Amino acid sequence: MLNSLFWTFWLWVIALPFAGPIKSIYIASVFFILSFLRFIKFPATISSFKDNWDEFLSKANEKIPYGYLIVRILFILSIIIIPMFLDRRANNILVDCGIYALLALGLNIAVGFAGLLVLGYIAFYAIGAYSYALLSVHFHIPFFVCVPISAGMAIIFGILLGLPVLRLRGDYLAIVTLGFGEITRIVLNNWDGVTNGPNGILGIARPSIGSFVFHSPKNYYYLILVFLFIAVFIFNRLNNSRLGRAWVAIKEDERAAKAMGINCMSLKLLAFAISAAFAGVAGAFFGAKATHVSPESFTFFESALVLCMVVLGGMGSIPGAILGASCLIIIPEIFRDYFGNSRMLLFGIVMIAMMRFKPEGLLPYKRRNL
């Protein structure tokens, strides 16, 4: 208890010049509450809640035919009707959650499955966005035709990057991918003849189906929901396949995986390429929604944010990636109204406390018996 009080006071002193006397008290109070939860076994409370939820689902399955399926259907229906009760700003935030959830699912393949620490992941996001922007503005190719092209461009660059660098491991791989992300941003910023430099590309066409054009946040919400359902299906199939098990084996012990006859280099390259494809699709969607892309949208902060989503939700976990993306997009927006620019300080404190008390993530991946 005294230790918590000491660190709370220290945090209040640090936050005081940045957040002011009142807001710094709020920030310190939140930290004290989070640290105090350590004494009431907060992780055990979460795990017991999950056990009770699993028990509830199993009993529902026993008493009601297809009870688990009914629960899933009700959950999907609730997701579908949510935008009808929200305003334009809230729906915009939900669309952003969907875009980042797609990115988090893609990065989860490289980080959560294959154990590849990628710090320049946002570069593939930028490649997908600029691929669609250029094809739309100069060649007037429709969005749904450009989506696989954007994914293909991201895969090509993923393979070109992966071939020389995937022989590296750990921190060295992270540094090289970080450099690739920064090089991509600088090229986009300086290649005036193609990317229009820092001004970016304007006038990108919105998605359309026949005469119907997606223009409102509600329309984009349902479109990104379709992309997410497809991504979750693909992710789940990979997770339950021999390929997914091979990735997990490489992540746990690459030497043992090689001894079992797994071609580690090829499978890591495949994980890198599939991960890049997810980012390319998300980038195309971002360009279509914003109708404008510029290099400032693809900084290192975005890469770090997506990685935080994966770690916060639980590496290798499908619901964890979606929950992590939702938390890291929605919570700062809630803090914006109360803390302004100092909200990121409080956000960082919450992340530190999370890693201290539940380092495996909010919804950790359950290890299967291989």
Image (cartoon, grey):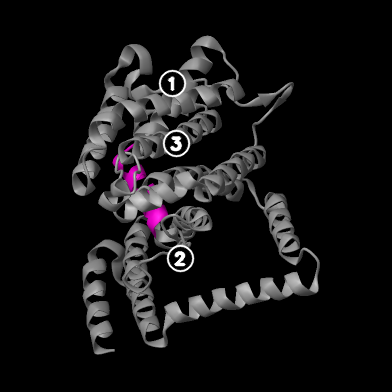
How many angstroms separate mark 2 from mark 1 (CA)?
A: 38 Å
User: Which stretch did the figure color magenta?
Assistant: 298-311
Q: Which residue is mark 3?
A: 274
- Residue found at x 26% / y 27%: 186
Q: Bin the neighbour count of mark 3 within 10 Å (Cα to Cα): few under 14, some 14-19, many 20 and up.
A: many
Whether residue 308 can be seen here: yes
Q: Looking at this view, is 77 or 345 the one in front?
A: 77
**On-image quarter of the C terminus:** bottom left
Q: Nearer the viewer, mark 1 or mark 3?
A: 3
Tag 3 or tag 1, which sits nearer the N-term? 1
- Residue found at x 32% / y 45%: 301
Q: On screen, 200 above or below 60? A: above
Please report contact status of discs 2 and 3: CB closer than 8 Å, yes or no. Answer: no
Compared across the picture, whether 74 is left or right of 248 comes to right
The secondary element bearing badge 3 is classed as helix
Q: Looking at this view, is 335 or 106 the one in front?
A: 106
Q: Which residue is mark 1?
A: 201
Tag 1 or tag 2, which sits nearer the N-term? 1
Whether residue 293 can be seen here: no
Q: On screen, 148 above or below 347? A: above
Instruction: Say the numbered circle drawn on residue 362.
Output: 2
The secondary element bearing badge 1 is classed as strand
Amino acid under disc 3: Ile
